[in-house]
Image (cartoon, grey):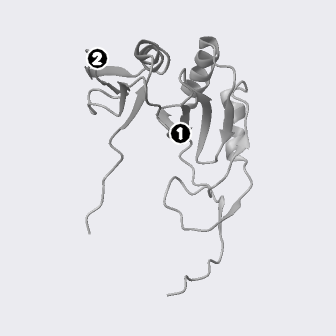
Amino acid sequence: MSKVSSLGHVGISVTDMDKMLDFYTRILGLTVTDGGEGRGVFLSASPETEHHEFLISPQPDRHTNAQQISFKIESLDELREMYHDLRDYGIDTFRITNHGVAIGCYFRDPENNHVEVYWSTGMDYPQPHGEPIDLDLSTPELVSIIENMTPKEGSGPKYYGRDAGKRLLASVPKMAR
């Protein structure tokens, strides 16, 4: 059976192209790779290896209804810096969550789309899981919180991340055939 190899890109409709392009390039750091002239603009976090991962398209009569748009960031220090950049930009409502497998910084973009910027911890931890965490803590304090998380029962096997002894396997009843 064939299967997809990865998520390619996400596109959203926007009403204020200039404002949204400024936000996604200047604040989130994406690079414009193509497009424009009244049509969609293609953006990439890694333009040397990926033509685009994100598309913004001017459609004033339409609004995107994505549950969330998530962007990965390379380090915990960069996540903390991004959080402060977003605050400086004027975003004042955040949900900062420790998922064990990642720390997510959730907020709304200028057109009210739900956006997450997250740092992957590289550690396996059963999902769903979410507890508040303070990105104003130092990086060593944040790492200590992650490393000292209580083991949790999971419903599935470990697929992702290093085994830090945090996944307690539960007995899962077999599905009726």
Q: How many marks?
A: 2
Mark identifier at residue 38? 2
Residue at figure coordinates x 64%, y 78% from the top left: 171
Which of the 4 image quarters holds residue 60?
A: top left
Q: Of callouts 1 and 2, which one flags the residue occurring earlier in the amino acid sequence? A: 2
Mark identifier at residue 169? none
In the rendered structure, are the residues bearing label 1 and label 2 in contact, judged by CB atoms less than 8 Å apart?
no
The amino acid type found where label 1 is placed reads: Gln
Q: Position of residue 69 (x, y in %)?
A: 49, 37
Q: Residue furthest bottom?
A: 177
Nearer to the camera, 92 or 147: 92
| Secondary structure of the residue carrying numbered label 2 | loop
Residue at figure coordinates x 32%, y 19% from the top left: 32
Residue at figure coordinates x 57%, y 27% from the top left: 112
Which of the 4 image quarters holds residue 15?
A: top left
Gap between marks 1 and 2 measured at Cα: 25 Å
Residue at figure coordinates x 68%, y 34% from the top left: 96
Q: Position of residue 29 (x, y in %)?
A: 44, 20
Label 1 belongs to which residue? 68
The relative height of residue 89 versus residue 83 in the rendered view (above or below) is above
| Secondary structure of the residue carrying numbered label 1 | loop
Horizontal side of 14 relative to 151 (left or right) equals left
Characterize the local packing of mark 2: few (<14), some (14-19) or many (20 or more) Cα atoms within 10 angstroms: few
The relative height of residue 173 versus residue 161 in the rendered view (above or below) is below
Q: Position of residue 55 (x, y in %)?
A: 35, 29
Which of the 4 image quarters holds residue 155?
A: bottom right
Q: Position of residue 146 (x, y in %)?
A: 68, 43
Characterize the local packing of mark 1: few (<14), some (14-19) or many (20 or more) Cα atoms within 10 angstroms: few
The relative height of residue 6 versus residue 157 in the rendered view (above or below) is above
The amino acid type found where label 2 is placed reads: Gly
The N terminus lies in quadrant = bottom left
